[in-house]
Amino acid sequence: MERSILSRRNFLGLSMGAAAGVALAGCGSSGPGTASGGGNSAGAASYWYLTGQPGEGIRTNSVNRFNQANPNTKLTATTFQNDAYKTKIKTAIGAGQAPTIIWGWGGGTLRTYAQAGQVEDLTSWFGENAAVKDRLFPSSFGAATIDGKIYAMPAETVQPIVLFYNKRAFEKIKAEPPQSWGDIMDLVPKFNAAKIAPFSLGGQSRWTNMMWLEFLFDRIGGSEVFQAVFDGQKDAWSNPAAIDALTKMQDLVKADGFIKGFSSITADSNADQALLYTGKAAMMLHGTWTYGNMATAGGDFVSSGSLGYMNFPGIDGGKGDVSDTVGNPGQYLSISSKATAEQKETAKNFFKTAVLSDAEVKEWVDSGSVPIVKGTESAFGASKDADFLKFVYNTSANAKVFAQSWDQALSPTAAEKLLDNIAQLFQLKVTPQQWATNMNGVIGQ
């Protein structure tokens, strides 16, 4: 799961623009690095975030711009590698020694912080600063909201899961991309007869399988099915829509819908992407962060226009809205409840004036990413990937619900149980009912 989170932060990383290259030297080693000096005033505050380009450089540039504009209330930035950060921030928050600003993924981890009173409730602040909230994608606030209150500032970029397809493979069998679940099931025997795997899948990574369930649950029962799980409702995984989704998933496995040996293929090696761009598989459900690698490693696959992409289709009779999507609706900045009043004011000023400023938005676009700011699509025109960036923007901006990836929305304990059970479901080792029973046992944990 942790490797997947890293890869999900590297959307189009291979096409990183010059702006991201302004990162401070010295950050990104095995230990923490101090990126910017703070100062000794009462309002001097601290900010911890991740290493790794292009994000590290862009975050650091925002801190530097803020410090230049606010010499009396500077931020001290400290950077950590992904795995080290997760351990360090958890320990620091538990010990009451958290930085003023806490970088994170929202969802389940934020919920634990909020319920323990370790982060500030920002609901009233957003009410007093409506312009800050109104310029962002509304869908980005879902993973920042716990029990109706906002505990984090949404930030950075959006990364939805989409259905990629190989146009050459479809031309070979003279078929069109699926518009429904029925179309998907009809395409399976046609591709198998042509010796093309219907779907590529890096099933050993487990979270790749999870993306299928996220869409099936939504399209069949609507977003409220998983919301009930997130809210801790008893036996929520046994919702009839959930059982239907799990059954349909195994129907696709039994019909040889996935590449043979998918349970031994890892997503981190990008082998699943290679199966798509080499024509060995016709379709792949995956995050938009894979586009950059396919453009770089796939020969003329992307540049020739052979890569197709679309939102996941609907299911006949389903209650879900076909505009809904899942993935990473943003990244999140919280304020430690242990910070002083002056430090909290510095953090809020940083949120208001520096986070996703015009300069930062330009840097994200130049790096090949889509910021969570409304109206940025006009900046995509100069990019060679303009069509794809506009697709990502429209998918995200028009989604009635942008659900956070389940393994990030749930607690670490529940997420690990989830991934284990999903692997067994795809290997046909558990029935849908057994799967639901197993998962009901960790609701609320």
Image: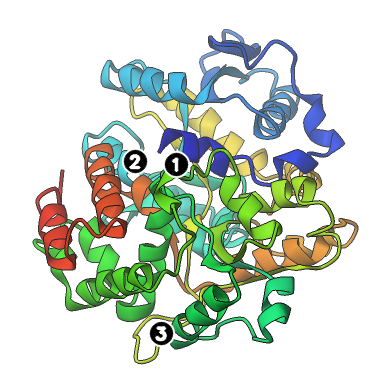
Q: Which of the numbered marks, if any, corresponds to residue 315?
A: 3
Secondary structure category for the residue under label 2: helix
Camera-nearest label, 1 or 3: 3
User: Disc 1 designates what residue?
Assistant: 105
**Residue 240 versus residue 71: which sits nearer the camera?**
240
Residue 229: percent from left, percent from top: 21, 60
Question: Dot 2, crowdedness within 10 Å: few (<14), some or many (≥20)?
Answer: many
Name the residue located 73 percent from the left edge and 80 percent from the top edge. 171
Residues marked 3 and 2 touching at CB (< 8 Å)? no
Residue 190: percent from left, percent from top: 55, 82
Q: What's the distance in space between the residues labelled 1 and 3, CA to CA? A: 30 Å
Mark 1 residue type: Trp
Left or right of 323 on screen, residue 115: left
Which residue sits furthest right?
Answer: 382
Answer yes or no: is residue 127 visible. Answer: no
Q: Quadrant of the N terminus?
A: top left
Mark 3 residue type: Ile
Residues marked 1 and 2 touching at CB (< 8 Å)? yes
Which is nearer the N-term, disc 3 or disc 2?
2
**Residue 358 versus residue 276: which sits nearer the camera?**
276
Secondary structure category for the residue under label 3: loop
Residue 156: percent from left, percent from top: 61, 45
Which is nearer the N-term, disc 1 or disc 2?
1
Q: Indicate whether 60 appears above or below 330.
A: above
Instruction: Indicate the colouring scheme.
Output: rainbow
Question: Dot 1, crowdedness within 10 Å: few (<14), some or many (≥20)?
Answer: many
Name the residue located 59 percent from the left edge and 19 percent from the top edge. 77
Q: Which of the numbered marks, if any, corresponds to residue 110?
A: 2
Quadrant in which residue 246 is drawn: bottom left
Q: Indicate whether 95 appears above or below 220.
A: above
Residue 292: percent from left, percent from top: 72, 48
Mark 2 residue type: Leu
